[in-house]
Amino acid sequence: MATAGGAGRPEKRKAITLAATVVFGREGYVRASMDAIAAEAGVSKRTVYNHFGDKEALFLSVALQNSAELTEKIRDLMAKYLDRVVDLRQDLVDFAVERARAVLSAGEHGALGRAIRAEVANIPADVLGAWLEAGPVASLRDLAAHFEALSERGLLAVEDAALAAEQYTLLTFHPVADRSFWGALPVADEEVERIAAAGVDAFLRIHGAPAPAEG
Amino acid sequence: MATAGGAGRPEKRKAITLAATVVFGREGYVRASMDAIAAEAGVSKRTVYNHFGDKEALFLSVALQNSAELTEKIRDLMAKYLDRVVDLRQDLVDFAVERARAVLSAGEHGALGRAIRAEVANIPADVLGAWLEAGPVASLRDLAAHFEALSERGLLAVEDAALAAEQYTLLTFHPVADRSFWGALPVADEEVERIAAAGVDAFLRIHGAPAPAEG
DNA sequence: GTCTATACAGGGATAGAC
DNA sequence: GTCTATCCCTGTATAGAC
């Protein structure tokens, strides 16, 4: 018997993964059909089952992969905006805007995250834990590390870096996630920018370094 | 032909509404079956169709009703904690805790909200607008009015009351909503309290009134 | 030996008929 | 209130093709 998640043409496997990400993201877990995923991937349904066993295993597999990819993408954004900071406020705003775009972009990574959140009650606890660890928790830790570094440089006055990272996310990302229902509906670019700016201003009131004495 | 949403024994209608709220909240829209709702209500499936037309109309009907009820409940909590404030910080913390409980309580109102959020892409724009207006938007407006009043009393220093209301919600409610996935998973009481306290502290750093000069 | 194509068994859903 | 028509989905089986 073919092993679920076992071998096969890696090319096909990749096509299935991508198709499943798209279809699960668009339709949600229950509405998505294995027929539609096979069609989207351009392979036969049997091939999907040979590679992934059953629908649930396929979903969980692409969920974990998606989570890791998104974390990597966000890590790149942090490196771009938070490593060599010159204008802290502007960099925090730009990072917020780009992260919201990356996570909540309609067609891409964000959509699957929404499907996972909708199915959370039906996901085994250990898989959910792995998804969290590879995704949101990892990003939070990365951001906390950056805030700690910025604090040591005197650009922030952060006591609890993990708390600060969460509050930055709450103030700059969640308003967009909320308005768009985690990417299901579009949000105008200008609104994302406005939200980011207001969120960063609030964040700096909580955790900003006191202005350096002049003269 | 029986009018969808028309007459019928109001007793039965109420039982169906309650049953639909429970089953949709527990299973989500797609998984919930009209059989299960009829059984939960203790009526025949035919009666359900006579009262509400079809599955989607039933869902949208209970969604709107649930949204309005939850708003009313939160309004009561605001009256309890934010009308006659003596210890502002404590009252803000208590309100945050109780609101999180009310909205995210596993079995009750919160569960249906999660189902609605999961189905947002399949809900007609006008119904979604009505749901928002009766629910989250109304609560935000109520909270902003309270913050304005507190500001006039000198207990807060709020410039933009709507923004302050949103930030309070972001800092005290969203961390719980996020951890519990909008009520799908339990969150320990102590954690809710810890989050509320940390959120209120951050909120007061943004919008708190400067300490009155003593002596 | 993996993939395609198709057909099919079994279950469950909505919605309507009687 | 039961019963049923119709449809769709998952997962398997049965063929043949590269």
Image (cartoon, coloured by chain):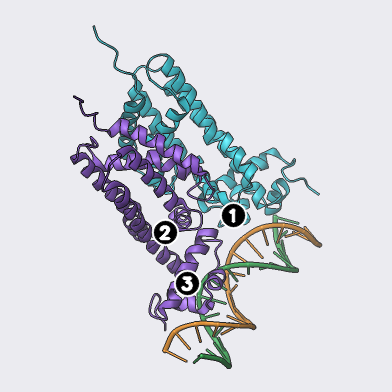
Chain colours: A purple, B cyan, C orange, D green
**Relative vertical location of residue B83 with respect to residue A172 in this rendering, above or below:** above
- Element marked by disc 3: helix
Residue B108 seen: no
- Element marked by disc 2: loop
Query: Distance from label 1 to label 3 (Cα)?
Result: 34 Å
Labels 2 and 1 positioned on one and the same chain: no
Q: Mark 3 lies on which chain?
A: A
Q: What residue type is labelled 2?
A: Ile
For label 3, the residue is: A16
Q: Which chain carries label 1?
A: B
Q: Which numbered circle lies on residue A123?
A: 2
B20 left or right of B91 in image: right
Label 1 packing within 10 angstroms: few (<14), some (14-19), many (20+): some
**Which residue is drawn at the image coordinates 39% and 40% (left, top)?**
A172
For label 1, the residue is: B36
Labels 3 and 2 positioned on one and the same chain: yes
Query: What is the quadrant of residue A155 in the picture?
Result: top left
Q: Quadrant of the C terminus of chain A?
A: top left
Residue A66 seen: yes
Q: Give the x, y percent position of residue B26.
A: 51, 50
Q: Nearer the viewer, mark 2 or mark 1?
A: 2
**Relative vertical location of residue D7 with respect to residue B39 in this rendering, above or below:** below
Label 2 packing within 10 angstroms: few (<14), some (14-19), many (20+): some
